[in-house]
Amino acid sequence: MEALREAQARLTVYVHPSNAADVRRAVARQLSALLFSYEERFDGVLLAHETKVVDEDEEKKKETVVKEDMQKETIAEEDKKEPKIVRAKILNGLVPYFGVRVHANLLLFSPQPDMILEGKVEMLGKESIHAIVLGVFSVAIMSEDIREKFKFKR
């Protein structure tokens, strides 16, 4: 269906310090609160999400080290024995939320004007047609939007 689309997003999710012990779960909870509601920033209804918290140390896959003889050599960070650190920025102000950078794959329902949608008609009335699209979304087509060749008969 054309109205469904996948999108990749780089987001900053603000997490309360009480959830600092399990940041990934807190991020998932924040995004799950947006499910099945229209979000203007995504230009659609969020149906599903898959997230990955950005580890700034992993983002820099290789690090350049200058040796004594001034030659550059790249060393993969996986060879280092340092613990991974997820960095977050604490917001200034009264509430000390911290922002966590996230890469997310999103499934969005984003119908556009003149797009054809398939649905199951639930109710026919003199003034409107009510249907369910994708088994989730309730739609109503008002009488002024119905083509004139269709007439209501009872």
Image: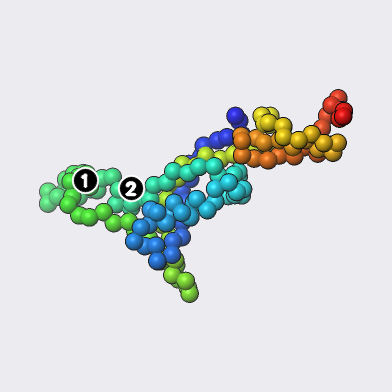
Farthest residue, direction top: 149
Foreground pick, 82 / 75 = 82
Q: Using the image, determine if residue 37 lies above or below residue 26.
A: above
Q: Using the image, determine if residue 34 lies above or below residue 16.
A: above
The C terminus - image quarter:
top right
Q: How many numbered tags mark residues here?
A: 2
* Element on which disc 1 rests: helix
Q: Are marks 1 and 2 in contact (CB under 8 Å)?
A: no
Res. 59 mark? 2
Which residue is rendered at x = 42% and y = 46% of the image? 51
Farthest residue, direction bottom: 94
Query: Where is residue 38 shown, x and y percent of the image?
Result: 62, 48
Q: Earlier in the sequence, mark 1 or mark 2?
A: 2
Label 1 amino acid? Glu
Which residue is rendered at x = 46% and y = 60% of the image? 14
* Element on which disc 2 rests: helix
Foreground pick, 42 / 67 = 42
Which residue is rendered at x = 18% and y = 50% of the image? 80
Query: Where is residue 64 shown, x and y percent of the image?
Result: 23, 48
Q: Which residue is mark 1?
A: 78
Foreground pick, 9 / 147 = 147
The part of the image, by quadrant, that contains residue 78 is top left
Is the residue marked by circle 1 packed among few (<14), some (14-19), or many (20+) residues within 10 Å?
A: few
The N terminus - image quarter:
top right
Label 2 amino acid? Glu
Query: Where is residue 70 shown, x and y percent of the image?
Result: 16, 49
Which residue is rendered at x = 52% and y = 53% of the image? 33
Q: Is residue 16 left or right of residue 6?
A: left
Is the residue marked by circle 2 packed among few (<14), some (14-19), or many (20+) residues within 10 Å?
A: few
Q: CA distance from mark 1 to mark 2?
A: 12 Å
Q: Kindly tell me whether residue 101 is visible in this rendering.
A: no
